[in-house]
Amino acid sequence: MCEQQLLNSLFYVFYGGVAALNMVASVYLLFRRSNAFAPDVTSPVRLRYWAAAFFAASALSHLWNLPVFFLTSRDDVVLGYLVAGLLDCMTVGPLAIVMLLAMLQDRQRPLWPVAVTVAPFVVIMTLCVATRSDELLPLLYGYFMLFAVGFIIYMIRALRRYGQWLRDNYADLEHKEVWQSFVVLAIILSGLGIYTFDSDGLVYECLIQVIDVVFVIYLLWRVETLSDLCSAFLHPAVSKPAELEQPLGPSKSIEALLQRHCIEQQLYLQHDLTLLQLAKAVGVNRFYLSQHFSRQGTTYNVYINGLRIQHFIRLYHEAAAARQSVTAQQLAYQSGFRNYNTFSSAFKRVMNLSASTWMRSNEEL
């Protein structure tokens, strides 16, 4: 008996610690202006606020779920879970969805569809609380399955469009891609979602809290390492030539402008060069420049990285002619790549072999 009481006491301490961790994460995101995980990255303010709201709701969820552990009557326990579930449906659930959507920065999505899709959860849980019965929970589970399938389909399509948007507008994708994070977050959220349907035993409750801790840490890392993409479009760093005022032009004309203002001036060496910045430098409307790349069967990302690969090859041949010892990492950075993994992938896509293999084969010539 004493051993069980000790275990219960340790669990309550752990439970309270997880609640405190969520609240600390919320306060941190709201009031800290610089990033601890990635100091050189400016994270989206909108995402930080939604994540902070989610963490605050998660901390409150621990509070309104806590009384259930001290209730003895089965009817009281059922009612406690129903009330806590209703509050979670009104706060934690919608905020988790909005937070995930906020990671996609290609456009600001409306929030009313989230309210519409969550409303059935709230209605069913309200009826359960009003009747003090869990007989309607199978209906809730059925709707949850439909909602989960629909949301997964929507996110797959949204992520594909988002990835295309990134390739159409950015030369460097570091700190911008999010599909890997969605997979990890989906797994973690699925673990937490099980708690809504079945929870029994102290070990199970501890496992849920461990998953919550992992979720908090991972989400904090994701928020702080994701670049704010709005600022890149609002504050282009490249000025437009005064003599060029073309809103649109044929492919040959645009190709000539790219040759003069991008290739000859080696503008592609600029880190994090965006399509908008290139359009400003060339003097062509961003929409028509994007259409130009599309007509060529390529993307802005592939175009810029292709120029960087050509620059890498020139630097290597110059170093080889001068009998200078160089590494692929050094030449990749000098060619405009900030991340070596990105360079390796781009090089293999263009040359059909790895950079190290290509360099070894050219040493023998």
Image: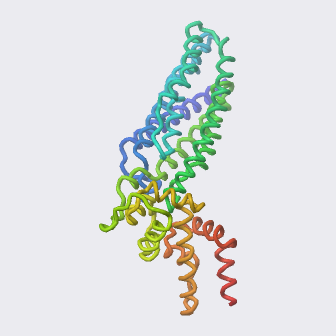
Name the image quarter holding the N terminus.
top right
The image shows residue 323 at horizontal and vertical percentages of 57, 92
Tell me which residue sits at (50%, 62%) in the image.
171
Considering every residue shown, the one lying at the far left of the view is 242
Tell me: 85 left or right of 1. left
Q: Is residue 112 above or below residue 343?
A: above
Tell me which residue sits at (41%, 39%) in the image.
49
Name the image quarter holding the C terminus.
bottom right
Q: Is residue 269 in view? A: no
Q: Is residue 129 above or below residue 255?
A: above
Q: Is residue 174 above or below residue 309?
A: above
The image shows residue 57 at horizontal and vertical percentages of 47, 30
The image shows residue 277 at horizontal and vertical percentages of 40, 61
The image shows residue 162 at horizontal and vertical percentages of 55, 48
Q: Nearer the viewer, residue 9 or 84?
A: 84
Tell me which residue sits at (48%, 46%) in the image.
106
Q: Nearer the viewer, residue 3 or 302?
A: 302
Q: Is residue 187 in view? A: yes
> By what rule are the colours in the image chosen?
rainbow
Tell me which residue sits at (57%, 83%) in the image.
316
Q: Nearer the viewer, residue 58 or 71?
A: 58
Q: Nearer the viewer, residue 67 or 120?
A: 120
